[in-house]
Amino acid sequence: MELEMSASSRQSLSSRLERSLATGLVLFLVGLPFHLVVKTSLPDPIGTYWKEILLGLLVVIWATLGFIQRRILIGGTALDLALLAYLGYLLMRLVFDRPGDQAWWGFYASVMYLPVFWLTAVVLRRYPTWLGKLAWLIVSLGAIVSLGGLVEFVIDRSLWPSAELVQRQGFPDVYVYGTHLRRVYFVFDSPTTLANTLALIFPMSLGLAYAATSAREKLLAGTAALLMLACIGFTFSRGIWVASALGLVIMGFLSGFFQRDKRLTLGLVGLVIVGLVVWGGVTLLRTSRLPGTDQGLVELTAEEYNNAPVLAVEHDLLERKPDFGETPQQVWTLYDPIAGQDDQRTVLYEPALKGVKTEVIYRVTVPDLGALKFGIALSPEVWSPEKGDGVNFQVYIAPVDAPQSGQFLFHRYINPKINPSDRRWRNFFLDLSPWAGREVNLSFINDSGPVENWDFDWAGWSEVSVVRLPYGYFTTRPASGDNLLLQYIRSIGDWARDETNRDRLAAWNLAVSAWLKSPLWGDGLGSTGLAGLRTNPEGAFVTESQVLKVLAELGIPGLILWLFVWFTIAKAGLQTLRLQLDFKNRAILFGILTSMLIIFIEGLVYQNMEVKQVNALTWTLAGMLAYLSTIRDG
């Protein structure tokens, strides 16, 4: 009798723990897209680490459940081996890499929400009918977030201003570079994180729309898919555009290959076309109403800057005494990650001072075809986050004979203290031809960052000169009358002039250089990305590639194990496609595989697994895949 009671009690406790595990997983997934809202609503440390606290409790429940049931609760597929091998290697590196916060934060950034894979697989094995419900839950979250992003685009303002963006650029709004075309992010840290999260979800909505047996379900899933596709479009994240297009094309071919019914392929193509038409129409309407943008400013790489077709240097302002202000000069050496070499320059040192804008004024006569050539930077000695909040650089021009008609020609906030892409010279040409032949006052102004912290605002202007450029130098660039949408699409392949592409090249070069210093073992956990910026901000950098992040930190063995995980995911997916799954499960499977393919492609050019929402959803989908690969329908 005691044994029977013990078994009965064990079964009752096991049942309660299983329900708790399933409920906790749902709460975790529901709260994750709204992490920033939760973070500001709850006191620290709960607000900041509620995800980790909840996941830790779920892992304890999972371990307890396994102890009660006297078995190891894992996925039951080859994915277990691949993930455990990768996790084991990370634990080994945690022991042998440099001790301290950097290794621990690096381990966290590499693992993050990996246990969600096993939690999802265990919950689905206990509650098989939850597969479809879990898919609908994820799609619903994507639709809600997308709706917020679309509202943000329509009203043209941030609904939940991102503190991270304010730190990085001085204001919460994000625009397509050189325009007033808004990029949306709703309750995420940036447009790119929102786009990557939705790219993981919208293929699932396509699968649900295809498999739905009622008109209501088809309408709901199809509407969710269109909302997410449109919102991804309005994030203007070009990398995820390309990754999504490639993923849909590949899965379209696979769906045609693995089934005789081609309706899924046609449905995918049709929904994508409808989404593109709606997005393109709204974008064209918005761009036609945008105010004109300043086409007289060009930002260049150091190589373009040094080899620019300058006809003559009319005024070398560093050689002149200003008409107002002081001009102490220093020599700074900044490493150029694109060229892969040091770039030494003489600078006009103009730190921002507390309570007032520092200003230096030169009076010059603008020549025909005149332009202002200059670079801006902060001294490498103050690239630590605790040293100030960056500097706002400004250029103001005022004709001497009509000072009331003066105007600002240039505004640029840079903060290399927390934004690694600003850790080099930012080089510009500014068109002065509208003032040709006139005597003007050129003001170079520096002001504090967004939180008005004037500490360590050691700002400098390099190679400041008035030059003559060939006729048409600025007008041969895209003009304000050109269609902004077409310009932006063309910029995907512009690796010479596009600012974000140059930033990505710089990050890739830094990652490769770091790896080459220790090609076999890597530079150690936490040397890049989130962990590096938190623990070693002066020397840290962002790889802008998940592949390069793994390679730079963990070396060749780490990359092999990481690729083995993705190979196992692909293998499991292709093997599951051959199983006799029912119609709905097969559609969900195609959605999962398309999502995983998109996020893998995007990971080549963006460290997307450091995005909390992307990381959690990736392992959730992998857990759903593991469950599907172990069932037999019919």
Image (tube, helix red, strand yellow):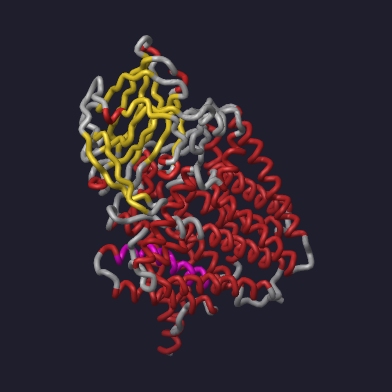
Does residue 137 sit above or below 165 in this rendering?
A: below
Please tell me in which quadrant of the rendered image residue 211 appears: bottom right
Instruction: Classify the position of the N terminus by image quarter.
Output: bottom left
Q: Residue at x 38, y 40 (%)?
A: 426
Does residue 98 sit above or below 320 in this rendering?
A: below
Please tell me in which quadrant of the rendered image residue 544 appears: bottom left
Q: Residue at x 32, y 50 (%)?
A: 342
Nearest the viewer among 148 and 164 is 164
Instruction: Classify the position of the C terminus by image quarter.
Output: bottom right
Residue 274 in picture, x, y percent from top left: 70, 45
Residue 194 in picture, x, y percent from top left: 50, 49
Nearest the viewer among 260 and 489 is 489
Does residue 330 sit above or below 219 in this rendering?
A: above
Query: Is residue 570 inside the magenta stretch?
Result: no
Residue 617 can be seen in this image: yes
Residue 274 is left or right of residue 133, and the answer is right
Q: Which residues are magenta?
A: 103-121
Does residue 196 sit above or below 350 in this rendering?
A: below
